[in-house]
Image (cartoon, grey):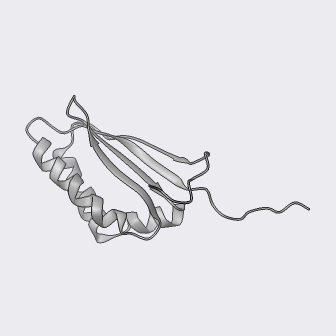
Amino acid sequence: MTTTSTAQAPVSLYGFLTPKPGHSDELRKLLIDLVEPSRGHEGSLEYHLHEQEDGRFFLYEVWRSQEDLDRHNATPLLRAFMAELPEHLEGTPEAYFGAMRSPYPASVA
């Protein structure tokens, strides 16, 4: 007998953000201020911010489902962030999105 799972694969969103000259501190603060609240949103599995040696920021998120990511993106926190983001960015974000194909661990250490 074969069973089919209806569970969705986790989705990931990741990419690089390059600050305008003189805007690194402001962009860093905006991004850091997103981390803990976003980790607390329903369906957040991973939410990490990295700063590269070249000054770019790398954001990596994993969500339980597309619906969870959509809810997160609709929050006042994210809408306010997205409204302010262009003021601090050089060019457009280099962003990627996809369904996770490797098994997601049951618990993260």
Q: In the image, is 4 to the left or to the right of 62? A: right
Residue 22 on image: x %, y % = 7, 38
In the figure, 34 relative to 88: above or below? below
Near-viewer residue (29 or 94): 29
Toward the front, the furthest residue is: 109
- Tally the marks: 0
Residue 3 on image: x %, y % = 83, 63
Q: At 52% across and 66% down in the image, what residue appears?
A: 67
Q: For the C terminus, give its image quadrant.
A: bottom left
Toward the left, the furthest residue is: 22
Residue 61 on image: x %, y % = 41, 52
Toward the top, the furthest residue is: 54
Q: For the N terminus, give its image quadrant.
A: bottom right
Q: At 44% across and 71% down in the image, what residue appears?
A: 42
The quadrant holding residue 91 is top left
Q: At 52% across and 53% down in the image, what residue appears?
A: 11
The quadrant holding residue 92 is top left
Near-viewer residue (31 or 1): 1
Q: At 11% across and 35% down in the image, what residue appears?
A: 21
Q: In the image, is 26 to the left or to the right of 53? A: left
Near-viewer residue (9 or 72): 9
